[in-house]
């Protein structure tokens, strides 16, 4: 890529072996091998979503990425997968260089990966979480403000990022509602070394999200999202569709009705009863939820899949950051990265120029 401002080549770029301080985050059902490889091929870094993949799908996707690009890429793993140990062992041997986590990692996991020379980058949503994972020896964090898509915390991006960069000494990627070059410059001003974006890449040419669903994102405005616990019990930002409003109204359902709804969704999403039960038991083990919440939540990944992969708009579970309100088209990932780098460079030059004038 052409001449961009030298301040944009931050130290973490060297550590990761990338040219641009931009992460395309792991997004369940969305960041496929195609999207991940396309992002990494530009010189930024893509993360494959493996939390929604079987082990065998994960292996195939990793190999596909390796065939498409020699550049570094990461995998986003579900830390409570029953086979997480096996997955990580395989990833280490397969030459994966970077790992991010769909939930908080465990200290043993971080140690094992670090000992094998793998860069670990968990996502955190609060200062104390950042301090904890930094103590465990992670290499960097993605600090995600509440404006971000999918599961998200409650501290706004503009408050969280400077708070976290002051609290820890490792590199921080800023996330949550960031979509452009000026967002990258703001992140640097807050002390971060780069940005991590989900929604911006979800709305790219290489993202296989069906066009009907992309259209729903384009049509939504910044106030059309909601941070809700009614989908799987954990705060998640999604487009505020009729389905989500319905789930919100039924949040305190008693078990029999919740179970009835869960079974109804199961039919709509083609999930086997056994898979539903497996997901429910894993959730009960890992989270403080009532069985009524679990009954609905166990279906959540399948509801998301039905929308984001199969294009079933009526199911209507569309995770998103508030940034969707300023995104109007789905360019290629290369165009996205080039535009961000050019805009950030211009913005930095303008800021310095006005300083010189004064
Ligand atoms: C459709 C979608 C799916 C997501 N799935 C995951 C996931 O599987 N694992 C994860 O760590 N984060 C997931 N996230 C969160 C993103 O990785 C990222 O942190 C977030 O989108 C950043 O905010 P932004 O969308 O405002 O850029 C998801 C986000 C979206 C929009």
Image (cartoon, rainbow, N blue to C red):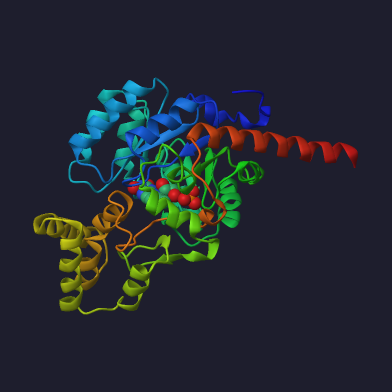
Q: Nearer the viewer, residue 259 or 162?
A: 259
Q: Residue furthest left?
A: 274
Q: Check the image and report above or below for 43 versus 308.
A: above
Q: Is residue 39 visible?
A: yes
Figure quadrant of residue 347? top right
Residue drawn at (30%, 39%) of the image:
109
- Horizontally, residue 24 falls left or right of residue 326, namely left
Q: Residue furthest right?
A: 358
Residue drawn at (42%, 34%) of the image:
46
Quadrant for the C terminus in the image: top right
Figure quadrant of residue 51? top left
Report x, y in % for residue 63: 27, 26
Q: Check the image and report above or below for 210 versus 156.
A: above
- Horizontally, residue 134 falls left or right of residue 245, namely right
Quadrant for the N terminus in the image: top right
Q: Is residue 132 visible?
A: no
Report x, y in % for residue 2: 63, 23
Report x, y in % for residue 225: 47, 63
Report x, y in % for residue 99: 36, 36
Residue drawn at (35%, 33%) of the image:
34
- Horizontally, residue 5 falls left or right of residue 61, namely right
Count of number-bearing discs:
0
Figure quadrant of residue 269? bottom left
Q: Nearer the viewer, residue 350 or 83?
A: 350
């Amino acid at each position: 890529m052409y001449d961009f401002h030298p301040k944009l080549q931050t130290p973490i770029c060297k550590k990761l072996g990338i040219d641009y301080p931009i992460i395309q985050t792991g997004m369940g059902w969305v960041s496929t091998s195609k999207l991940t490889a396309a992002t990494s091929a530009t010189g930024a870094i893509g993360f494959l979503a493996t939390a929604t993949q079987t082990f065998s799908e994960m292996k195939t996707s990793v190999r596909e990425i390796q065939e498409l690009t020699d550049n570094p890429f990461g995998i986003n793993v579900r830390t409570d997968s029953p086979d997480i140990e096996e997955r990580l062992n395989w990833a280490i041997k397969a030459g994966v260089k970077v790992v991010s986590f769909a939930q908080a990692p465990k200290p043993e996991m971080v140690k094992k990966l670090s000992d094998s020379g793998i860069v670990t980058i968990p996502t955190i949503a609060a200062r104390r979480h950042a301090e904890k994972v930094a103590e465990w020896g992670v290499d960097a964090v993605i600090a995600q403000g509440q404006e971000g898509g999918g599961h998200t915390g409650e501290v706004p991006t503009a408050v969280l990022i400077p708070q976290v960069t002051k609290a820890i000494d490792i590199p921080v990627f800023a996330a949550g509602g960031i979509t452009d070059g000026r967002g990258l410059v703001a992140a640097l001003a807050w002390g971060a070394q780069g940005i991590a974006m989900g929604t911006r890449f979800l709305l790219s040419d290489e993202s296989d999200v069906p066009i009907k669903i992309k259209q729903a994102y384009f049509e939504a405005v910044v106030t059309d999202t909601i941070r809700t616990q009614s989908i799987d019990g954990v705060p998640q930002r999604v487009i505020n569709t009729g389905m989500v409003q319905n789930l919100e109204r039924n949040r305190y359902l008693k078990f029999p009705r919740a179970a009835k709804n869960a079974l109804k969704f199961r039919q709509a999403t083609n999930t086997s009863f056994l898979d539903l039960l497996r997901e429910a038991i894993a959730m009960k083990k890992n989270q403080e939820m009532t069985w009524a919440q679990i009954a609905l939540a166990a279906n959540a990944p399948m509801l998301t899949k039905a929308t984001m992969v199969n294009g079933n708009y009526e199911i209507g579970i569309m995770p998103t950051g508030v940034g969707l309100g300023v995104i109007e088209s789905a360019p290629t990932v290369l165009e996205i990265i080039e535009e961000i780098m050019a805009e950030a460079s211009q913005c930095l030059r303008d800021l310095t120029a006005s300083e010189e004038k004064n």
